[in-house]
Image: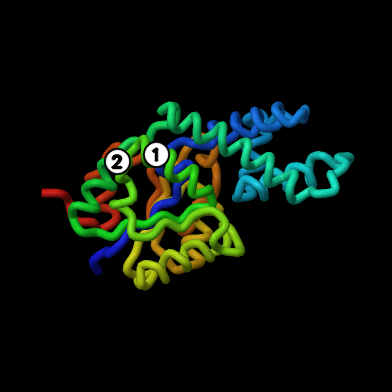
């Protein structure tokens, strides 16, 4: 069967973004007078929860039992996340977080071959735009027919909502598509939507369970191998 669309996760898949997120959270905490500091080991645990605001809440509830929540707790979390996003997008604009090997080539070649491309992520639209503007150029949007991100669905990964939203936008069935993910949460999300999924691991996800993935790669530096595995037409 001919693949009509590739749906991409963003964080950890298009770029190794997670440590940039971690550093940006810590800058936001310091700016807001909080003595919180997320090291690599702790952040690895926090990544079991998708979504930045959800991750802050999980940290407070699971690791800070004595924390006195402010009256407007939702506003407190939203502000922290907004400050963090500012630091993170600044890192992206400065070119500190490049696209992973093979990603730019895959996007441009697949688009040229007439394959529909889309995004399905829990990260904010601002983060997606800042990353792809640097990685693909100011006209990066021309490559993607649907941009599913942030809070546009009620339940984030591992729920299938974001993938189901993208399928509706593309007017395609799950069988017409493949997904590219990097984490167990992402894989569970795409598989729950019925989409055949390929995984590229990164340092934060390399030890996770990828049962059900069509294939697992270190990265996409060998694109011809990925094309053959996924049944995609090789560029002429």
Q: Which callout, 1 or 2, points to the residue nearer the camera?
A: 2
Task: Measure the C-alpha gap from mark 1 to mark 2.
Answer: 16 Å
- Choose between 131 and 20: the one closer to the eye: 131
Q: Position of residue 88 (x, y in %)?
A: 54, 34
Q: Who's the residue at 53% across and 59% down the image?
A: 188
Going by the image, does 226 lie left or right of 216?
A: left
- Choose between 92 and 206: the one closer to the eye: 92
Q: Within 10 Å of the Cα at label 1, are there few (<14), some (14-19), or many (20+) other Cα atoms?
A: some
Helix, strand or loop under label 2: helix
Q: Who's the residue at 45% across and 46% down the image?
A: 10
Mark 1 and mark 2 lie on one chain; the one further toward the N terminus is: 2
On screen, residue 111 above or below 69: below
Going by the image, does 102 lie left or right of 87?
A: left
Do the numbered discs 1 and 2 sit on residues whose CB atoms are within 8 Å? no
- Choose between 65 and 126: the one closer to the eye: 126
Residue 104 is labelled as: 2
- Choose between 88 and 161: the one closer to the eye: 88
Q: Who's the residue at 40% across and 42% down the image?
A: 14
Q: Within 10 Å of the Cα at label 2, are there few (<14), some (14-19), or many (20+) other Cα atoms?
A: some
Q: Which residue is mark 1?
A: 218
Q: Who's the residue at 49% across and 54% down the image?
A: 149
**Quadrant in which the N terminus appears:** bottom left
Residue 10 visible in the current orientation:
yes
Residue 213 visible in the current orientation:
no
Going by the image, does 222 lie left or right of 48?
A: left
Residue at far left of view: 236
Going by the image, does 90 lie left or right of 99?
A: right
């Amino acid at each position: 069967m001919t693949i009509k669309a590739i749906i991409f996760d963003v964080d950890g898949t298009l770029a190794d973004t997670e440590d940039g997120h971690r550093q940006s959270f810590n800058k936001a905490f310091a700016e807001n007078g909080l003595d919180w500091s997320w090291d690599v080991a702790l952040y690895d645990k926090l990544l079991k929860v998708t979504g930045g605001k959800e991750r802050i809440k999980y940290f407070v509830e699971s690791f800070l039992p004595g924390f006195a929540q402010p009256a407007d707790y939702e506003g407190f979390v939203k502000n922290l996340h907004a400050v963090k996003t500012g630091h993170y997008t600044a890192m992206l604009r400065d070119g500190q977080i490049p696209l992973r090997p093979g990603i730019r080539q895959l996007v441009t070649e697949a688009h040229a071959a007439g394959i529909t491309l889309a995004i399905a992520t829990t990260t904010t639209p601002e983060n997606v735009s800042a990353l792809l503007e640097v990685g693909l150029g100011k006209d990066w949007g021309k490559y993607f027919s649907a941009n599913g991100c942030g809070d546009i669905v009620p339940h984030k990964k591992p729920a299938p909502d974001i993938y189901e939203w993208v399928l509706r936008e593309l007017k395609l069935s799950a069988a017409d598509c493949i997904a590219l993910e990097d984490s167990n949460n992402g894989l569970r999300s795409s598989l729950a939507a019925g989409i055949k999924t390929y995984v590229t691991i990164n340092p934060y996800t390399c030890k996770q369970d990828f049962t059900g993935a069509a294939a697992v790669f270190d990265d996409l530096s060998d694109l011809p191998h990925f094309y053959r595995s996924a049944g995609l037409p090789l560029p002429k």
